[in-house]
């Protein structure tokens, strides 16, 4: 990576074809995923962020169709029945799921689609799309996590407690992820996240067309 001086260098570097892929981002509640995702979308134009459906009530400032599709439990169950979801999971009393149509359309356009989802959903995506990349975001320490959740001020003490309990459970499954990113400096973390995702396009298994073309060329220059 020593030649890379700007983010643009890693995106314009070759004749390699880029197929849209899935990047799954998870992390403990309060690890700063939301801000990180916003910055990733603002800084780079090759990503599409999937908007999930949820039965949870909107937090102050959250908008339907922007932060989530806020739906009733009945509508969510209908989405499951109609096979409209790529994956779904239950998290602290509510359902969350990824609408399938948008993700598939964006990948077809060559976009890398970001799914900001919890661990059960992440593992389902890994099983369906083995070439996806799974990245887990965490704070440096558990104490910092608690501090950030309390400062957010959007959840009751009871919900914060349950989210920390959930974090303790999820911490056990994190080794299934490909990478762990410690979010201690937003600008640095967003750059690193972009590198990690873009590096996946350079896996040899993702570049079979390029390799085939190169083999043909080799025969012509012999
Ligand atoms: P929050 O209520 O804080 O917005 O989200 C709670 C958890 O649900 C977070 O860990 C978030 O990543 C996860 N989540 C959001 N959307 C989805 C989804 O579509 N599927 C799954 N499996 N988890 C989701």
Image (cartoon, rainbow, N blue to C red):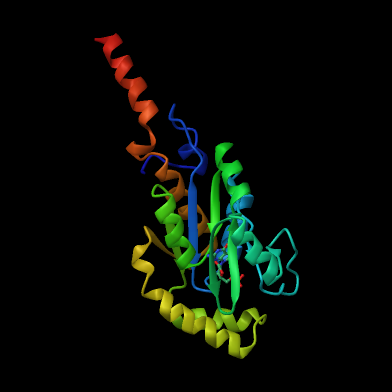
Q: Is residue 66 above or below residue 14?
A: below
User: Is residue 202 placed above or below 175 in the rendered structure?
Assistant: above
Q: Determine whether, in the image, residue 197 is placed left or right of residue 52.
A: left
Query: Left or right of 22: which side holds 171?
Result: left
Quadrant in which residue 98 is drawn = bottom right
Task: Give the residue at x 45% y 42%.
Answer: 5
Question: At 75% across and 64% down in the image, what residue appears?
Answer: 63
Examine the rendering and report whether any part of residue 46 can be seen: no
The image quadrant of residue 136 is: bottom left
Figure quadrant of the N terminus: top left
- Which corner quadrant of the image does residue 151 belong to? bottom right
What residue is at 35 percent from the left and 40 percent from the top?
A: 203
Residue 210 place in picture, x, y as percent: 38, 27
Q: Which is nearer the eye, 218 or 77?
A: 77
Furthest residue in direction bottom, as rendered: 158
Viewed as shown, does residue 38 lie left or right of 202? right
Quadrant containing ligand 1 reads: bottom right
Say if residue 39 shows up in the picture: yes
Q: Position of residue 76 (x, y in %)?
A: 65, 65
Q: Is residue 191 shown above or below 141? A: above
């Amino acid at each position: 990576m020593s030649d890379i001086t700007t983010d643009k260098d890693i995106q314009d570097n070759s004749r390699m074809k880029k197929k849209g892929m899935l990047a799954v981002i998870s992390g403990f509640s309060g690890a700063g995923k939301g801000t990180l995702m916003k910055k990733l979308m603002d800084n780079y134009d090759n990503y599409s962020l999937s908007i999930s459906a949820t039965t949870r009530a909107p937090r102050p400032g959250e908008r339907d169709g922007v932060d989530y599709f806020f739906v009733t439990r009945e509508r969510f169950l209908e989405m499951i029945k109609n096979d409209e979801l790529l994956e779904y999971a239950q998290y602290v009393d509510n359902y969350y799921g990824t609408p399938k149509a948008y993700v598939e359309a964006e990948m077809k356009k060559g976009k890398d689609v970001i799914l900001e989802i919890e661990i059960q959903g992440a593992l389902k995506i890994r099983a369906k799309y083995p070439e996806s990349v799974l990245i887990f975001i965490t704070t440096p320490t558990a104490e910092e996590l608690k501090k950030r959740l309390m400062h957010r001020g959007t959840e009751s003490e009871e919900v914060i407690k349950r989210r920390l309990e959930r974090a303790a459970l999820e911490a056990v499954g994190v080794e299934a992820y490909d990478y762990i990113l410690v979010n201690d400096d937003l600008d640095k973390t967003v750059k690193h996240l972009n590198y990690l995702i873009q590096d996946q396009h350079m896996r040899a298994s993702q570049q079979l067309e390029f390799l085939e073309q190169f083999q043909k060329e080799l025969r012509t220059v012999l």
